[in-house]
Image (cartoon, rainbow, N blue to C red):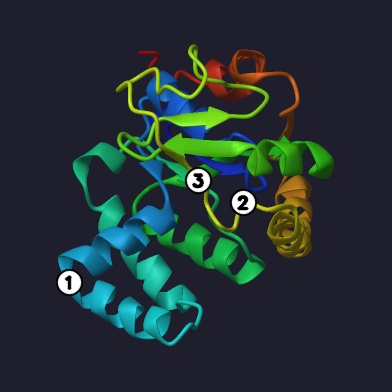
Amino acid sequence: ISSQAHSIILFGPPGAGKGTQAVRISQTTGKPQISTGDMLREAVREGTDLGNEAKGYMNRGLLVPDSIIIGLISERLKRSDASGGVLFDGFPRTIPQAIALDKLLITFGLKINFVFELIVDDEQIISRVVGRYTCKNCDTGYHDQFLKPKIEGVCDNCGKKVFIRRNDDNSQTVRSRLKDYHRKTSPMISYYSNIGILYKINGMLGVDNVTKKFNATKLLQVGLPIT
């Protein structure tokens, strides 16, 4: 496995800033970001065979089977931009998924070499998520504490004055999601820690400082292209 074939997994609870850091890591390393949620929505929207199969489960309120998820990832890895390794955003979530992913990657000449766990206190997560809101017109994101519009009640981006909040961005729902995350993710953390490729990142430091922590790891010391 060459350094170009290194792949990355990024873990983090909802609201930890995982999406922001994933975009930055992708830009820094040149590795495409793979989100299974995005892939599922795209496949369903485009009406692919796997998408239609997944839609049947989703419409019945059932979890999409691992076999479909792995199938979607397999299709994504066939694209030319994945040949140098990829960044998995929030996947795998279970040990069977991790094992299936390892087997799949081998067939493409790829390997997971870095697993980052973005750590943020639950109470901080709750305050982050509960305070989120967006401009109804252009989807620009804001926060009651951390990112207010420059002019109160007016979107910085489009100038409109109507904002919305997601119904599930409340403390009770967030606590439930966090409990589920910790329950499912704890075995994964042990799995990758035992292999010796787990790196813990303090997600409480602010966006730019968290990025610096990522950049200070061995991730940028293995011959990866820096854009």
Place of residue 101 in the rendered image (x, y in percent of width and height, measured from the top left):
49, 60
The residue carrying mark 2 is 169
- Pick whichever of labels 2 and 1 is earlier in the sequence: 1
Categorize mark 2 by other alpha carbons within 10 Å: few (<14), some (14-19), many (20+): some
> Residues at badges 2 and 1 in contact (C-beta under 8 Å)?
no
- Pick whichever of labels 2 and 3 is earlier in the sequence: 3
200 to the left or right of 61: right
Place of residue 66 in the rendered image (x, y in percent of width and height, measured from the top left):
48, 74
Q: Which mark is residue 89?
A: 3
Tell me the SS state at disc 3. strand
In this picture, is 60 found above or below 129?
A: below
Place of residue 105 in the rendered image (x, y in percent of width and height, measured from the top left):
42, 54
> Residues at badges 2 and 3 in contact (C-beta under 8 Å)?
no
Categorize mark 1 by other alpha carbons within 10 Å: few (<14), some (14-19), many (20+): few
In this picture, is 171 found above or below 24?
A: below
The residue under the point 82% across, 41% down is 123
The residue closer to the viewer here, 170 or 159, is 159
Q: Amino acid at mark 1?
A: Gly
Q: Amino acid at mark 3?
A: Asp
130 to the left or right of 226: right
Q: CA distance from mark 1 to mark 3?
A: 23 Å
The residue under the point 57% across, 24% down is 219
Q: Amino acid at mark 2?
A: Asp
The residue carrying mark 1 is 47
